[in-house]
Amino acid sequence: MTDWIGDTFTSDVGWAHLETLVNIGNRMAGSDGEREALERTRDALDAVGARDARIEPFDVQGWERGDSAIRLVEGDEATTDCENPTVASGPNQCVALPRSPASEAAGEFVDLDYGVPEDFEAAGDLDGAVVMVSSDTPDSLDRFVHRREKYYRAVEAGASAFVFANHVEGTLPPTGSVGTPDAPIGDIPAVGVSKEAGSRLARRYEGDELAVAVDCTTPEAESGTVAAEIGPDTDEYLIVSSHVDAHDLAEGAMDNGAGTATVVEVARALAAREDDLDTRVRFVGFGAEEVGLVGSSRFAATVDPERVKAVVNVDSNVFGRTLRLDHHGFDGLEAAADRVADRFDHPVSLGAELVPHSDHWPFVERGIPGYMVSGETAGRGRGWGHTGADTLDKLESRNLREQAILVTELVVELADATVDTERRDREMIAAALEAEGKATGMKLTGGWPF
């Protein structure tokens, strides 16, 4: 039966949910908007036929932004008079990074270019400096260096403040959280600046004394996890997941309204194909992903790894038309993806390296087979992601429908009782991270679980 394919390609359920999410506005972890998004996702899963749709709440460290700025220091104090105002401020130039502390710090301004380990080593003494790094990673490096690693290298080097400069043009300051699981509020004030503001800072203020000021509040807050199920009541189950929260600067259309909308569309398709499922499917919408995988880490800690057959986590798809499946070296997942691609004669991009970001990771680090499902895009980094330009107009409903069809078939394939996904030993995961050069950064940021 292939009727489900036509039904999915003509369905507006997923796209309608995407519009619902982006129209909420601020979906920052712990906010009223995130709570509304969790409720709307629960209701959408219930409406398409998933059973026992619910929200499981949990406490989270809240963070609410105020103003932020970079000021030129003259004499003993940062200048605030009208004739010599801040050198970077406002929504098109400078924004606080979530979970930055509320503080102001000054020091010699040092542009560290990409901010990869070699740049920090070459810089020498950075004690008390205001350090700026790029959001990009050079092609010469064989791994992506995450924002958080760059931040904690700056902290370790004794920097007084951190400036994260976008490499994407368009006056788009990037966001992205700092902090660790044990210390959710970071050590030094941190801001994101647009490419243009970063270029101006590097050109005009290298070696000058600058002050970075962040105003924010850090209330206690509540987030949650949406859960629902489809399929037979088996002990073993699959998890199909996404994160519902988004950064407060944008609509969060690609990251990750698209992923959550795809999960809802897949749930609709699987409800119609329930007889094809040999294994129970749990649909999960995580809160507080953007502030350190909080929801998925809590959830993963409660599961029995032997009962989770695989995790299919959808994050930042639809913007790229070709579906990308990072399978983390699990042979069973790679084989299942190949079979689906061959069956549909449809391009699918596969990746074998470990991706220690997004909500699959708390499961994969425990040896549970897991995909990171995204959209294939050119170049490194998020592009418009994590900026105010992550908006609905950049996405196409065609891509969402095509990808939902492929993910639906992939889940049915994995649910087949004859398909073995085979878990991996945690020591193998740790060794692979070491071999891929990712262990150093994870240990630095408090994300090393081994």
Image: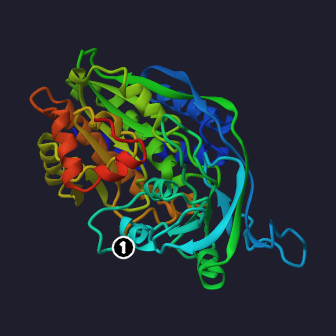
Nearer-the-camera pick, 242 or 84? 84
Q: Is residue 235 something that shows in the picture?
A: yes
433 on left or right of 228: left
| Extreme-bottom residue of the structure | 203
Q: Position of residue 441 (x, y in %)?
A: 36, 52
The answer to whether residue 107 is above or below residue 105 is below
User: Vertically, is 357 above or below 39?
Assistant: below
Seen at 38% across and 45% down, the residue is: 314
Q: Position of residue 227 (x, y in %)?
A: 45, 25
Instruction: Return the x and y of residue 411 as percentages of the image width and height.
Output: 26, 37
Instruction: Please rate how many residues cluster around mark 1, counting C-alpha atoms within 10 Å: few if below 14, some from 14 to 19, many from 20.
Output: some
The vertical placement of 319 against 423, above or below, is below
Left or right position of 303 against 332: right
Instruction: Please state which amino acid type lies under the numbered disc 1.
Output: Pro
The one nearer the camera, 29 or 310, is: 29
Residue 3 visible in the displayed image: no
Q: Position of residue 275 (x, y in %)?
A: 24, 24
For residue 122, side relative to residue 411 (left or right): right
Residue 305 appears in which quarter of the rendering?
Answer: top left
Write the residue at 32% across / 74% down. Answer: 139
Q: Secondary structure at mark 1?
A: loop
Identify the residue at image location x=11%, y=32%: 420
* Quadrant position of the C terminus in the picture: top left
Residue at 41% of width from left, 42% of height from top?
446
The quadrant of the rendering that contains the N terminus is top left
Depth order, front residue of 33/150? 150
- Residue occupied by mark 1: 138
Q: Residue furthest right?
A: 82
Which of the 4 image quarters holds residue 86?
A: bottom right
